[in-house]
Structure formats: structure tokens, C-alpha cells
Amino acid sequence: MSTARELVVLGTASQVPTRTRNHNGYLLRWDGSGVLFDPGEGTQRQMLHAGVTASSIGAVCVTHFHGDHCLGLPGMLARFSLDQVAHPVDMYYPAAGQDFYERLRDVVLPFPGLREHPISTSGPVRAGAEPFALEAVRLDHRVETFGYRLREPDGRRLLPERLAAAGITGPAVGRLQRDGVITTASGAAVTLDQVSVPRPGQRFAFVMDTRMCSGVEELADRADMLVIEATFLDRDADLAHDFGHLTAAQAARAAQAAGVRTLVLTHFSQRYPDLEGHRAEAAEYFDGELVVATDLQRVPVPTRR
């Protein structure tokens, strides 16, 4: 099974695509799982260019039902059927958009493996599920909108020098990890805590169309990677607020305050043909790894803290 953890950027435009920016689409590859976020128009074709397949997707997350975030959904559902995807695909979306969702779903032949999960409130939507839990958090846009956070369970990192000092080797290491305690050949009881240290699980957050709100802060909190809209520059902050969006500066300030490690800016208005302004504006406030996303780019999730 692949152990890759990376974001495959399928599109970075906002309402209007451009010659170089397709409508939204983001595939998170997480070990052997794939989560597709906000499949806009043209997502199927972008996947072909990116070299990723429908069979790699196990879940689809839609933040809201504006066209640039969902018009690729019928094509993806048709593709699941055409490619005879053998595993179930979980579909997460705002419950308030149920009518819109059904219209998009029903224009193609049914995919029998589809499992629908309408979301009506913030909280876990896939709690405790391996290899990660999934949460939804309400945002502040012109229609009901949710952002998503993927959280890997916390674990323990074994310390080889402590294992060696305790005389634990070979299959005994696996038993210790499974049972939490082991009795050595000398009769001593050794616990997992004695030979390891905490290993925080990784966090990935996805924030699309929204004004600044507590939901942005909650989703971004200690994220290893935050994918966030930066539709406007600060000089157009009034437009951003009126239309329910963020500026690059707002996104960067939120990421810095939340302790984000890799910040991925996307969802750019067509009014900005050159994105160096977004880079410069965000860099004033964020000192971690900054990515101004481009179509078909691959961004690795940073290694564990």
C-alpha cells in the first residue's frame, strides 16, 4: 500500500476559470486513501492530467453548493460507475443543499457504492475511523458552508535505545505495541510508555469560501497543512467581505496564529492574473512553508512534528 501523503491540486480558480486555472478540485492522498474536496467543473479531465484515478477516491467532501465547488460532481459519480469502483465512496455535504445535491446526483446513472452523509451541524462526521477521523466546522459564507479537518489518531514513537536497554527485540516489540506491556526474560514488566514518547497525529484542514470567523480558527488550529481560499488581496478587503471571502493577508494571519506548518493558498479571483501579490502579502504575516497553489501541483504533507 502506498504511504504517500500529499495534496494534488486539480484547480485553483474561483467563480470564473482562466486559461491557466481550472475550477476548484483538490485530492488529498493519505496513505492508501483518497479524499476529493470540492470537485468543480472539469475535475475529471484535471485528474487525467494529474495522473490520478477515480478508483483512488474513498470520500468526497463538498463545502457548499456554489457551482465552482460542485459542478464536477455528476462527472465524478458517473466515473465511479464507469470505472466500476469496487469500494464504497462516502459523500459529505451540507444538508441545507440537499435539493441541489440530488439534482447533481440524479443526472447520471446511480453508483451503488455511494454512501451519503448530509451535514447539519459542526462536529465529527467520521469519528474514530481508521486511518483518520473527519470533522466538519461551519463557516460564514452566503450559503451554508462547512470546512473539513482530517485528524490522524495520536500515537507513540518507540525509542530504540530504551528498547535495547530493556532487552526488547524482534516479535516482542510488536507484542508491546499491541498489548501496551510486556514481561521480559528477566521477569521485569515494561510498559509502552517507558520505551516511547507521544507522537501527535497529523492534521489537514480545508477552508473554502468564508469570511473570517471562529470556524476558520478552529479548523486551522495546529494543522500540518491548511488549504485555504485567498480569493482577494487586502486592497479589495471590502469586496471580500461583501461576497463572503478571505484575502491572502487574512488567511496568512489566521494560519500564523493557529500554528500551521504548510499554508496552501488557492481559489483566486480572475481579477489577479499575477499571483505574486498574494505571495508577498501572505509572507508578511506567515513564516512557515507558503505555497501559492498552481493547477496540477503536488504538495507533500510535512513529516510529523
Image (cartoon, grey):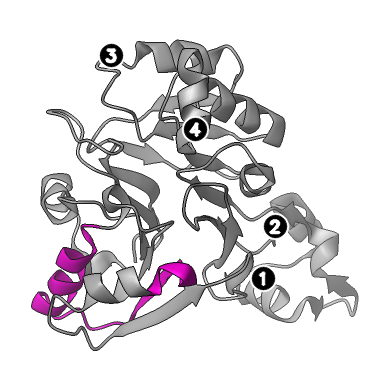
- Of 220 and 86, the residue lying toward us: 220
Residue flagged by tag 1: what amino acid is it? Answer: Val
Q: Is residue 232 found left or right of 284 in the rendered image? A: left
First in residue order: circle 4 vs circle 2:
2
User: In the rendered image, which residue does mark 2 sit on?
Assistant: 158
Q: Residue at x 14, y 79 (%)?
A: 81
Mark 4, mark 2: which one is toward the viewer?
4
> Please, is residue 248 above or below residue 89 in the view?
above
Q: What element carries label 2?
A: strand
Provide the secondary structure element on which disc 1 rests: helix
Q: What stretch is highlighted in magenta?
A: 71-98
Sort mark 1 into few (<14), some (14-19) or many (20+) by Cα contacts within 10 Å: some
Q: What residue type is labelled 3?
A: Asp
Left or right of 33 on screen, residue 49: left
| Residue 36, placed above or below residue 119 | above
**Residue under the image location 34 percent in, 66 percent down:** 1
> Where is mark 1, residue-wise?
173
Foreground mark, 1 or 3, reads 3
Residues under labels 3 and 2: Cα distance?
Answer: 47 Å
Expressed as whole percent of the image width and height from the top left, the position of residue 223 reads 61, 44
| 29 and 245: which is toward the camera | 245
User: Among all residues in the image, which is located at the extreme right?
Assistant: 188
Density class for disc 3 (Cα within 10 Å; few <14, some 14-19, many ≥20) is few
Marks 2 and 1, the one that precedes in the sequence: 2
Q: Is residue 88 magenta?
A: yes
Magenta stretch contains residue 97: yes
- Measured in 3D between alpha carbons, the distance from the residue under mark 4 to the one under mark 3, in whole angstroms, is 23 Å
